[in-house]
Amino acid sequence: MALRILIHGINYAPEFVGIGRYTGELGAWLHERGHAVTVLAAPPYYPVWRVPAAYRRPAWRREWLEGVEVLRAPLYAPARVTGKGRVLHELSFGASCLAWWPTLWARSWDVVLAVCPLLQSGLVPALLARHQKVPFIFHVQDLQLDAARELGIIQQPLLFALLSRLEHFLFTRSQAVTTISRAMAARIQEKGAPPERVHLLPNWADLEAIKPGERRNAVRRELGLNAEIMVLYAGSMGEKQGLEIILDAAAITRDNQAIRYVFVGEGAAREQLMDRAQRLALETVSFWPVQSRDRFPLLLQAADIHLVVQKDKASDLVMPSKLGNILSAGRPFIATARPETELGRVATESQAGLLTPPEAAGSLAQAVVHLAQDEEARRKMGLRARQFAEAWLGREKIMAEWERLFYGLVNQGDRDRI
């Protein structure tokens, strides 16, 4: 039975990193399975926080991507991402989406799925699903409200109280709340979601496009590296990560010219990190922009050690999507996380990563030096990384679980109406 599926979320293809990648691949896969999929999303802007010229006019547009109907609504993308700028960014998208809702409200759906963040993106889809008496699924990629509180991004008590009420409404009224890690699932249940309605659907690894490969490749040569140990952080450079710790570790190991630290990505903290690296005269640190989709696997393969860094307060509020790609590439990683967190569990279960305490530069530097000196340990951890990805993070396996959830909820709804 083909389903009519509505997906609402700020990020979507052609973004190929972060949440947009996963929602985009889910929509395309569902279309391949014969389902009619419509997506309401912003124009692509992440991770550079800039809308391409091709998507600026017309601001509201309908397009088809891999068979999926995609409705675009414009948004404000701040040049510098601050707490106030992020609030305006989110409000602008919510307001511009209102132009599409009368059309979507008039159409019939079998399943409605909203992706968080944004938290407020779930409200209208939830009301639409209730009006049409169809299942509503709230997919939590990021415990956005908790992260904003812990990191001091939201400091207005009234705004936080309103968002807390909205979060509780969405968690308790959804037919299913899905999320990407066990720790986040437990937190969602603590917030009132019925346990039987909480489902674990992790972000998958691209096992076909990202595979173990030769480290001395074209990307490494462009970086000016040969036999040196390349320590890579590739991803968003935002407030949740606490990436200053990498610079502090680089300062500790600065006399070891064989260890080179490479940052690849964009984000609110990038310029500050670059300025700090310059002030500290860190010659072993370099910064590179986001790489294209076809170069990304080469980047992952070029690294000898990957870093997955987060602040202690945010360690179980988000699950870095980069980890699946690191495992798929067959490379070891170092995570700044406590053993009881989700990152800590994955490191222990996969035996592909080392753990260091969050925000402890000395421990991180020590772990980097340890792995840099032990090529055999890196090789074995890399093999285990790929094995773990193949066992647990295959795209087809997780996509099939999504489809089973859709069918299960639709069939349950049909039984309840009899």
Image: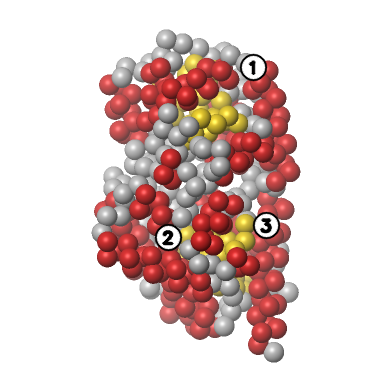
- Residue type, numbered disc 2: Leu
Query: Could you tell me if the residues under marks 2 and 1 are in contact, i.e. CB atoms within 8 Å?
Result: no
- Looking at the rendered image, the disc whose residue lies closer to the viewer, 3 or 1, is 1
Numbered disc 2: secondary structure? loop
Q: Residues within 10 Å of mark 3 (few under 14, many from 20)?
A: many
Q: Nearer the viewer, residue 379 or 184?
A: 184
Name the residue that disc number 1 marks: 375
Q: Position of residue 33 (x, y in %)?
A: 71, 63
Q: Residues within 10 Å of mark 1 (few under 14, many from 20)?
A: few
Q: Residues within 10 Å of mark 2 (few under 14, many from 20)?
A: many
State left or right for residue 9 relative to residue 199: left
Q: Nearer the viewer, residue 168 or 251?
A: 168
- On screen, residue 142 above or below 212: below
- At 30% across and 33% down in the image, what residue appears? 272
Query: Could you tell me if the residues under marks 3 and 1 are in contact, i.e. CB atoms within 8 Å?
Result: no
Of the image marks 3 and 1, the number of the one nearer the N terminus: 1
Residue at far bottom of view: 418
- On screen, residue 4 above or below 77: below
- On screen, residue 26 above or below 236: below
- Residue type, numbered disc 3: Met
- Residue type, numbered disc 1: Glu
Numbered disc 1: secondary structure? helix
Name the residue that disc number 2 marks: 118
Give the alpha-carbon distance from disc 3 to disc 2, as whole Å. Answer: 22 Å
Q: Nearer the viewer, residue 304 or 294?
A: 304
The answer to whether residue 1 is visible is yes
Name the residue that disc number 3 marks: 399
Q: Position of residue 300 (x, y in %)?
A: 57, 31
- At 54% across and 83% down in the image, what residue appears? 132
